[in-house]
Image (cartoon, helix red, strand yellow):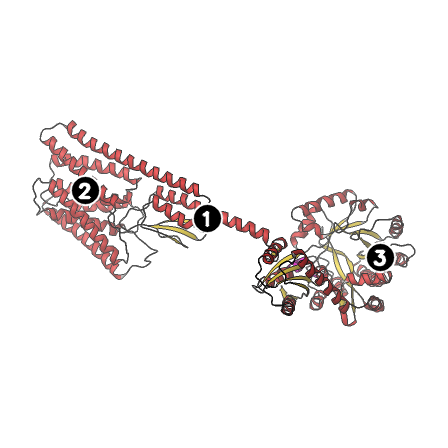
Amino acid sequence: MTAPAHQPNSRPTTPLAGHVMDAILLAGAISAVVFGFSRWRSGVPEIDAQALGFAVPVLLVLGAGALITVRNPLRNELPSILGALLAVSVIVLDPDGPSLFPVWALLVPVVYLLVRRGDPLILPRAAITVWAGTAMVWANEPVDLGSSPYAQAFMGVALYVAVVLLLIHLWDRTHGIRTTRRLTPRAAVVAVVCVMYVALVIIALNLVADGRSWADAAAMTLIFLLALALAWVAGQFQRATATTAVLLEATRRSPWPVDEAEGILADLLARTIRTGNITFQDAPGGEDTLSVPVRPGRHVVIRRSSADQMFTREERALAAGMASFAYTAYLQDEREAKLVAEATTDDLTGLLVYSYWRAELAQAMARRRAGEHIAVVFIDLDHFKQFNEDYGHLAGDTVLAAIGRRLHSHSRQWRFARFGGDEFVGLGREVPGRAELDRQCAELTHLISEPISSGSEQLLASATVGRAMSTDPKDDVEALIGVADDDLRRRKRLRERQEAPADEEIVRSLLAGGVDVAYQPIVDLRTDEVTGWEALLRGSVGEYGPLEPIDLVAAAARLNALDAVTRSLGEQAIDLVEEASRRLDRRMTVAINVEHHQLRSDGDLLPWLIARADRVSCLIAVQLTERGGEPWTSTYTEVADTLSRHGVKIVLDDFGSGFSRLNSLATRQWDGVTLSRSLMVHGVRGPQLLRNLTAMLHDLGVPVTVEGLETAHQVDIARSAGAQFGQGIHLGGPAPAESVHRLVAGGNLHWQPSTNSWHARRNRGDG
């Protein structure tokens, strides 16, 4: 039996009645001590030798009991038990009056300080014990039942227990604590055993006083102690057996179902730890509870009555071990959920992966209700390849992620997945008919076309939506998807015919002065300085506005006008970079993209390049793309060698993508190789491959440029791989001639991330 335990979670503030109760307890205890010492005015009380002979073994018993119970489940009962034993000793030592009572009363808080060190309620606990001892000692003065002092001792203990229980009840009520258990069975048994043992010691001492030998008295007390020890060992064995059985059951049921874990844990804890109640809550309990986390932000909290003992270290370890099963169940469920999400969800868009979506489609078609229409849509973003080239792949990822979020939250009627790249598929349930499907596809088109914020810019995207409807339960899944895909391609071809000008109109516009040039800086990664610019084709055609470079090149090639377009671009670019070289007093590089089939000795491009190279001081580099897979011929070698003799550098462009072949590196001694950005985005293998290719090219004596660098991290990778030069949005995006003039005029050739007007104009006009 103990004084009340603190419960901060159940009652964070003490009511006024509680403060009054605490004041009464402390005032009464102090008054009892002062009154007791007032009896010493005539002198310190005398104690005869027989009483001291009794006191020595009693104190030894108390010391042994303290050593045993400090590390025992009875630890919390120790102060009250010692208080009872000391009070009984006072009665025996001083049967004629309570003259030794104040000494005992001063020992009570000392015992509490030693045993319950750090307990915030030491004073109320000690005060309740002193009140009970006062009642025991003073009530025994008028009591005379014979067999003194044994009758007084037993009556005193009974009164002591009654007063403790009464005061605990009042303390709980005044502090707003509602508990039903006051005197636990274990505490009651301990109190009875202690009283019996004290009585046994008293009887043994009186036998010695009557002439019996000390050996007989000692044997009687030791036999009783041995019986107690055997009973304690038996209890511990029974407890260990029960605990082992519960742990085996917990192991057998592992892994626990996560939705049943709390119920299983509560059941097992109730069978192994004596509890008042078990709850699960977000925050841990107070210091008087046993709180163990069962998962992040969730705790099991075990409480006992304020009159019960505190939880032992062994009980806390057992509860933690039990809770670990629930924690493991949660972690396994979380890990499985994460694996399922990774297997079924696209990382970038948050939509389903295609394989999982297709399985859902097959299941929907197999389990459709009678008459249910199932729709499939195929979505393709328009001109997205050019979007990536203009703004960078990071901006492209931003657009894809935003569109994924919009599709995901669009309607519970639809389930979308990323098919790959910039294509998406959707599954619609219970679509009434074709007209409704067309209306919903128009909504999807509008949804995708809404502006997407990326930093300070507003990015725009557009999409074409193919569609298919299934009304027959016998329809094939792949056939339905194929119909939607075919409809998408048909709509894109129709849209391109409606939106795109004819080849003749494109070429006529370009040759009439419609060739625009965008300049992307080439940065020396060793010095972070701009060493030149790559000239990129741009062009607009009347009301159609800016067209994609790939469409411009294709139209010019089909009409055999690509050499003329290249010359128009080259004239502008060479003049600009030549002027920059003169103003900076250093030789800058201008890189011009040329297709393989333009390397002809009978064409107009070769003599023009030779003539310009002979007249300018800037360095001209011809970049030959490696994406088309066209084999290198002897004619190409002759033309390239001719250009080299006139100081034109021949660079292999975009190596590492498309149809790139290692034997291309052996066709000639290249003046440079530009490595594709695709090497930067293939996990850990990409950078490793980049390092290996760069090292190989260094061994061949070929300078390396890495393009498509969009982040500082990618620049660091390229630099650490040994690449001499870099290009990309992070180093400076494609910009009009005005930005080159400003850079040259400022004289600062150190690169800065590009925020040029070309991006702004393309951003507003590109869909």
Count neighbours of disc 1 (C-alpha within 10 A) and say few if under 14, some if 14 to 19, many if 20 or more: some
Disc 3 element: loop
Give residue 59's mark. Answer: none
Q: Is residue 395 magenta?
A: yes
Frontmost residue, 430 versus 161 = 430
Label 1, label 3: how many angstroms apart (C-alpha)?
77 Å
Give residue 86's mark. Answer: 2
Q: Is residue 105 left or right of residue 757?
A: left
Frontmost residue, 245 versus 523 = 245
Label 1, label 2: how many angstroms apart (C-alpha)?
53 Å
Residue where numbered disc 1 is placed: 257
Count neighbours of disc 2 (C-alpha within 10 A) and say few if under 14, some if 14 to 19, many if 20 or more: many
Frontmost residue, 482 versus 113 = 482
Disc 1 element: loop
Upstream in the sequence, badge 1 or badge 2?
A: 2
Amino acid marked by disc 3:
Ser
Is any atom of residue 566 visible in this view? Answer: no
Count neighbours of disc 3 (C-alpha within 10 A) and say few if under 14, some if 14 to 19, many if 20 or more: some
Label 2, label 3: how many angstroms apart (C-alpha)?
110 Å
Q: Position of residue 633 (x, y in %)?
A: 87, 48
Is any atom of residue 326 visible in this view? Answer: yes
Q: Is residue 551 magenta?
A: no
- Residues in magenta? 390-397
Amino acid marked by disc 2:
Leu
Q: Position of residue 230 (x, y in %)?
A: 26, 33
Q: Position of residue 495 (x, y in %)?
A: 74, 67
Frontmost residue, 12 versus 227 = 227
